[in-house]
Amino acid sequence: MPSNQKKLRKPAIVLTKTDHKRLSLLADRFADQTPDLADFLFAELERARIVEDKRIAVDVVRMGSSVHFTTDLGEDRQVTLVYPGKADIAEGRISVLTPIGTALIGLKTGHSIDWTTRDKRACRLTVEAVGQPQEAPN
């Protein structure tokens, strides 16, 4: 492996049954349009531990969560993780069907994950804080 490529590490992730089901359907629906992103989401769904919706810890990123994270590129961002139709980067709402959105799903406060940007750079992000949605996202 070239020295400028980082080994991509994956921490354990947790998803609610509802998020897992909805994200599986979403990945299925987008498999033909964006196969790389759908495959990345499928891989995350496959490795996730699934829990009852009411048993998800408050510090776990789920759909609709607001997330404060930092990156090894010096970014310090606050975003809300949403479904593609609700995404609006100017409003800080990022789609779960983006490389960073898929990387965030299921992480806990304090966890870090390596991910690859759309321009193929390997980066590392760390979840600093998670806020839960007031209601279930749609």
Image (cartoon, rainbow, N blue to C red):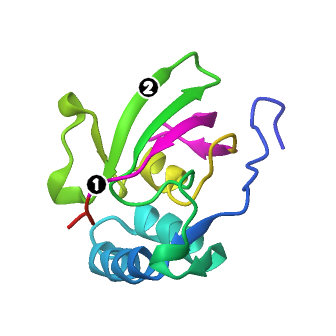
Q: Residue at x 38, y 74 (%)?
A: 23
Position of the N terminus by quadrant: top right
Q: Say left or right for 70 vs 119.
A: right
Residue 100 position within the rendered picture, expressed as x and y whole percent measured from the top left: 47, 45
With respect to residue 12, does 93 lie above or below? above
77 lies above or below 64: above
Mark 2: which amino acid?
A: Arg
Question: How many numbered marks are there?
Answer: 2
Element carrying mark 1 = loop
Residue lying at 31% horizontally and 75% vertically, measured from the top left: 26
Quadrant of the frame with the C terminus: bottom left
Mark 2 surroundings within 10 Å by alpha-carbon count, few (fewer than 14), some (14 through 19), many (20 or more): few
Disc 2 from disc 1: Cα separation:
21 Å
Mark number, residue 134: 1
**Given the image, on which type of amino acid does mark 1 rest?**
Gln
Q: Which mark is residue 77?
A: 2
Left or right relative to 32: residue 87: left
Q: For this view, does 62 lie left or right of residue 90?
A: right
Image quadrant assignment for residue 134: bottom left
Question: Residue, x 57% and y 15% (percent of image)?
Answer: 74
Determine the image quadrant of residue 93: top left
Is 136 rendered above or below residue 103?
Answer: below
Whether 125 is among the magenta residues is yes
Is residue 130 shown in magenta? yes
Q: Earlier in the sequence, mark 2 or mark 1?
A: 2
As rendered, which of 51 and 11 lies closer to the eye?
51
The residue sitting at 27% across, 68% down in the picture is 33
The magenta stretch is 112-134
